[in-house]
Image (spheres, rainbow, N blue to C red):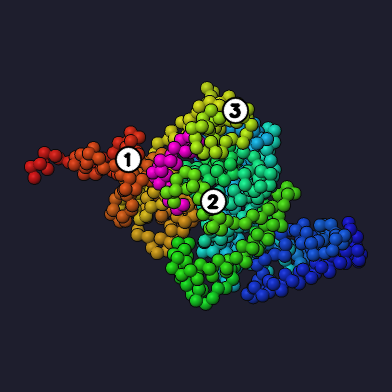
Amino acid sequence: MNGNARNSKFDIFWTELDNYFNEINLAVHERRHGQHMYLPYAISIEDLVSIIKKRLPENTPIPSNEWVRLQFWPTNPNTITALRYTARFEVKFTIQSRQIRGQHEDSHYVAVQLQYIKAFAVKYREFTDFLWIDDKAIVPIGEPGLPVSTGVRPHNHSLAPKSGPSISALDHDYNVCGAIPSVTFKCDILEAASSSFFNGIAFVTVKDKVFSPSNAIRHGCETTNILRTHYSQDDTQVNAEHPILIMYTDGGPDHRTTFGSVQIAAICMFMWLDLDFLITARTAPMGSWANLAERVNSNLNLALQNVSLSREHMTDNVEMKMRGINSLKAARDTARRYPAFKEGLIQSVAPVIELLQERFGHLKLKGEPIVISPSANQESIDDFFKIVKDLIDQNLIENKLTKTDLEKSATLQDFMKKHCRLRNYTFQIKKCANALIENCAYCLFNPPRLPDEVFDTLSFVPDPVVASNNKYESFETVYGQATNDLARPSLMLSSQNKEIDKKNRKILNATKVRDAVLCVECGKPRGVYSETKLTYIEKQAVDRLKELNSFTCGSPLFPHSSKYNSSIIVREGLRCCSTMETTYYSKSTVSLPAVCFHCGVAKSSDFAADQNIQSLQAQYSVVRPICVKCKDDGKEAIVRGKRNVKRLRKM
C-alpha cells in the first residue's frame, strides 16, 4: 500500500482531488432538477487519476489507483471489505438507475471472404493499410432539463457522490436529437492471417444525428482526412503512405458495396489518396460482430455508462418550433424553411458533442489513446466529391448516386469496367496493368506507386471457391485466378414460405398493404401489412424505423420485443433474390411508386415500352413493369389475365 490515511505524502493530490469534486458538483447542480445527477465524476479510477495528474505540477507524488479507490465510501458498507475504505471523500461507486445473435445464409461464405482478405493483407503487408469502420449506435440527447440515458448497460460502477443527488435519467424510446460516434480502427498487420488483427490505433468522430447524418460520401471524406493527416506519404498530407488500402465495414446503408453512393465514395478515396489498389468489404447481414470496430465500440461504452445527456436551451421562438417535431424528417423540413432553426439546434447540441469527444478522449485501447478526429463540414465534403466530377463526369450529382443514375454515365461505366470489380460483399478498384497504362487517361497521369515487380503480382481478391469436399479452397490456391460469386448461398435461394407467413396469410394480401419499406441489401421496397389502417402513432413508428435504414429482406419489420411485432408485419419468406410481391402493385389501400418487378429499383422513367411490351398489354389485363436493363438481361415481363382478343375485336 502507499501508506496509511494519516500520511501527508499525497496531500497535494488529495487537495486537488477534493477541488475537482467540488467543481463537478457545482456544474452538475446548475444543470439538474431536484436530487438527480446525470454525469459521473470519471469513467474509471485510472481516468480520475489521469485527470488530477494533469492539473498538478510535474513530479507531484501520485498515489496508486488502488489507494485512490480506498479513499471513497464503500459501495456496500455492510461487508468486511468496507473496513479497508477511509471514506476521505463522500464519493462511491454507483450504477445509474433506469427502468441471441442472428445467422444469415451467407455467414460462412463471408467469413471465408474475410480470411482471403486477411491473407491478401499479410501477403502485401509492407504496402498496405487495413481499416475497420463502423458507426456506434446513436447516443440519444434529451430536451433541455430532461436528460436521457445513453442506453448503455452499466456493467461497471462509476464515481458519484455518496449522498445527495443520485445518478438517474429519463428513458425514452425515441429522441429527435442524438450523436453518432463513428469508429475507424487502423489495425497492425502481422505475419500470419491467423494472427489477431486487434492491435492498432482507433479514431473516433462524433457527429450530429440530425444535420450531419452518416452517409457514404461523408464517411469517405472523413476517412480520407484521417489517412492524410496521420498516415500521409512524406508528411505531405496528400497521398496515402501506403498504396494499398483495405476497408472492412458492417455493411450499413452508408457502407453497402452494392450501393452507387458507396462505390463513388470509394472511387473518390482511390483518387484523393492516389491508391494503386482499394478493397472495400462488408460483413453478412446480422454479422456485424465480425467487424473489429465493434470491439472498439464496446470500449466507447465505458465513457457512456451512467451518463445522461440533454441539449442546451434555444431561444423561445426556436423552442416553440421544436415542440411540434417528432421525427428527423420533420426537423430537416423545418430547417429548410427556417434557417435560424437549423443554426439554433446545431448550437444547442454542440456542447453535448464536445462533452462526448472529451469523454471518449480519456479512453485507451490496449494502452494506446483513442484519437478524436473532427467531423467533415459540407465544404470539405463537396470538395471531396468534386474530384470524381473533375476526372470522370461533370454531370454526376452528389445526392443522385443510385445504380440507375450511375448507369447513365458512359465515362463512369468505362472507368469502372477498366478498374473495378463488384460483388455483393466486396468492391475493389485497381490501377491498370503496366502494359495497359497508355490506354487509360487516369493511369497515364497517375501511374502505380508500387514497385513494378510487386504491382505485376497484384490481382483482385478472389471470390470464395468451393472445393470438392464441400469446403472452400485456400487463398493461396485461388489467388490470381478468375473467379465468380455463383457459390454465394443467398444467390441460389428462391423465395421461401416460412411458417410465420403461413400463420399471417390472412393479413398478407392486397387489401392489407399499408406502406412499403426499403431493404438496405437489395433496395427493393417490401410491402408493410396490417389488419387495420395504421393509426397516427403506428405510422410514426414505421416512419422512424424507415429512418434507421436497418430492414433487410427475410427479417421481421419490428423486433420481437416491440409491441408492433405481430400487428405490423412484412412477408418474411422473401429474400433479396426474390422478385417484387404482386400485392405491392395493388392500389386497394395505398398507392405506392411503380418499380420494376424484377430489380425493384428502376422507376417508371426507365421502364421498357417497346412494341413487345405494347403487344403484351393488348393481350393481358396485367403486365408487370420491367425496366430496359432487366429486359436486356434476358428477363421477361410478368403477365396475368389473358384477354379474349376475338371478343374485344367484335366489340
Q: Earlier in the sequence, mark 2 or mark 1?
A: 2
Q: Which residues are magenta?
A: 398-425
Name the residue rendered at 55%, 66% in the picture.
Answer: 346
The three-letter code of the residue at mark 2 reads: Phe
The residue mark sitting in front, 2 or 1, is 2
Classify mark 1: residues with Cα within 10 Å, few (<14), some (14-19) or many (20+). Answer: some
In front here: 435 or 418?
A: 435
Residue named by callout 3: 457
Outermost residue to the top: 468
SS assignment at label 3:
loop
Identify the mark at residue 628; answer none if there is no mark. Answer: 1
Q: CA distance from mark 2 to mark 3?
A: 31 Å
Q: Is residue 471 left or right of residue 304?
A: left
Name the residue rendered at 64%, 73% in the picture.
Answer: 32
Is-magenta flag for residue 412? yes
The three-letter code of the residue at mark 3 reads: Thr
